[in-house]
Image (spheres, helix red, strand yellow):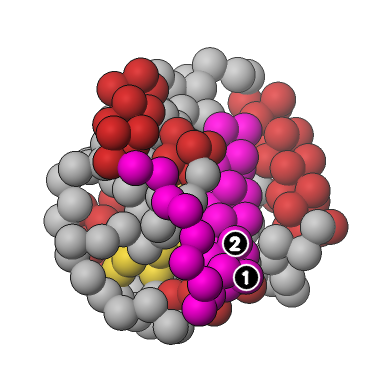
Amino acid sequence: MTDTMPNTMTNAKQREQICLLAKSMFDRGLTAGASGNISVRCADGSLLVTPTGACFGRLDPGQLSHISAAGQHLSGDAPTKEMPLHSAFYESRQNTGAVVHLHSTHSVALSMITPADDDKPFLPPLTAYSVMRLGKVELLPYFRPGDPAMGDAVRSLAGKRSAVMLASHGPVVAGLELEAAVYAIEELEETAKLCLLLRGMKPTMLSDAQIRDLATHYKIEWD
């Protein structure tokens, strides 16, 4: 699963990694303009966060926002307005080491044609890796960007989901560390793309037994 223990990298290395992986996602079209945000938990419990209005393709390690464990802005530019969303994952999933939020095209498109259904995951079990890296993805309703209610919605899941989809907005994934969270959110986008490509067809899904086997083997939250 995507989180089992906190990140132990140095602050400087974390800053470099945030900028490197953010640019990789930007260059591949996973987010555009000044959309998307990343946070990483430091060894002392503080957070490194991408600034508000920042472009993933041009992040400066020295300008990343540094937020104390108590939520105080310590240094750098002002943090993303989505801090309530990030904070909710750190509070409800204590072993979370990083949170990534994108406005990736296919997942947003899928959210706009998928009815909310508490009994069905946002992403059907098409591939083993989508189940392994994401578990059951919860579709949350639309919220105004930056609305603290987004954080409340995440907290209402009581830590059961490492990945959620904000309707008409974008996916959010919490992970053990940043690289795992990035790989997971990329898997989410690719699976959403598969769903759209297969729309109107009858693809073979993973069976309940196959999902249970993955859930047991990789300690995945699917219930």
Magenta-colored stretch includes residue 89: no
The image position of residue 160, as x and y in percent, is 22, 42
Towards the viewer: 8 or 123: 123
Q: Give the side of residue 59 with respect to residue 85, left or right.
A: right
Q: Mark 1 is on which residue type?
A: Leu
How many other residues sit within 10 Å of disc 1, few (<14), some (14-19) or many (≥20)? few
* Secondary structure at numbered mark 1: helix
Whether label 1 touches label 2, CB < 8 Å: yes
- For the record, the magenta segment spans 178-207
Q: Give the side of residue 134 with respect to residue 106, left or right.
A: left
Alpha carbons under labels 1 and 2: distance apart: 5 Å
Towards the viewer: 221 or 45: 221
Residue 51 lies in quadrant: bottom right
* Secondary structure at numbered mark 2: helix
Res 197 label: 1
The image position of residue 128, as x and y in percent, is 49, 37
Answer whether residue 40 is visible to the viewer in this image.
Answer: no
Q: For the point 45% across and 34% down, which residue is it?
A: 132
Residue 97 lies in quadrant: top left
The image position of residue 13, as x and y in percent, is 70, 25
Q: For the point 45% across and 83% down, which residue is it?
A: 112
